[in-house]
Image (cartoon, rainbow, N blue to C red):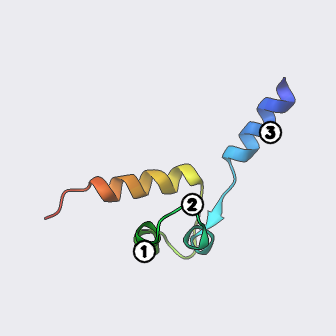
Amino acid sequence: MSKIKKDEEVIKDHTYSKRQFIQSDMYSIMDRDVLKIILNDDKKYTKEEVNSMLKDFKTKEVK
């Protein structure tokens, strides 16, 4: 059991670059355009972080 739990933790901790997210088929073309703006070139992100940032961006009130 602990090996399975440990493997799940490793999967959750995978980080990816901005370029990898932009090239991913996980996101629509419009979402990829947003990711180009909100992600930093020099930083790596988890999928959860990016999904959260994307959701925040989409729900942000327009001023």
Q: Nearer the viewer, mark 1 or mark 3?
A: 1
Which amino acid does the dot numbered 2 rest on?
A: Met
* Contact (Cβ within 8 Å) of mark 1 with mark 3: no
Dot 3 crowding, Cα within 10 Å, few <14, some 14–19, many 20+: few
Earlier along the polypeptide chain: callout 2 or callout 3?
3
Which amino acid does the dot numbered 1 rest on?
A: Asp
* Contact (Cβ within 8 Å) of mark 2 with mark 3: no
Earlier along the polypeptide chain: callout 1 or callout 3?
3
Q: Nearer the viewer, mark 1 or mark 2?
A: 2
Mark 2, residue position: 26
Residue 53's image quarter? bottom left
- Vertical placement of residue 53 versus 10, above or below: below
Q: Secondary structure at mark 3?
A: helix
- Residue 58 is left or right of residue 61, and the answer is right
Mark 3, residue position: 7
Question: Which image quarter holds the N terminus?
Answer: top right
Which amino acid does the dot numbered 3 rest on?
A: Asp
Q: CA distance from mark 1 to mark 2?
A: 13 Å
Residue 9 percent location from the top left of the image: 72, 39
- Residue 61 is left or right of residue 12, and the answer is left
Q: CA distance from mark 2 to mark 3?
A: 22 Å
Earlier along the polypeptide chain: callout 1 or callout 2?
2
Residue 30's image quarter? bottom left
Residue 18 percent location from the top left of the image: 56, 71
Residue 45 percent location from the top left of the image: 58, 59
Q: Secondary structure at mark 1?
A: helix
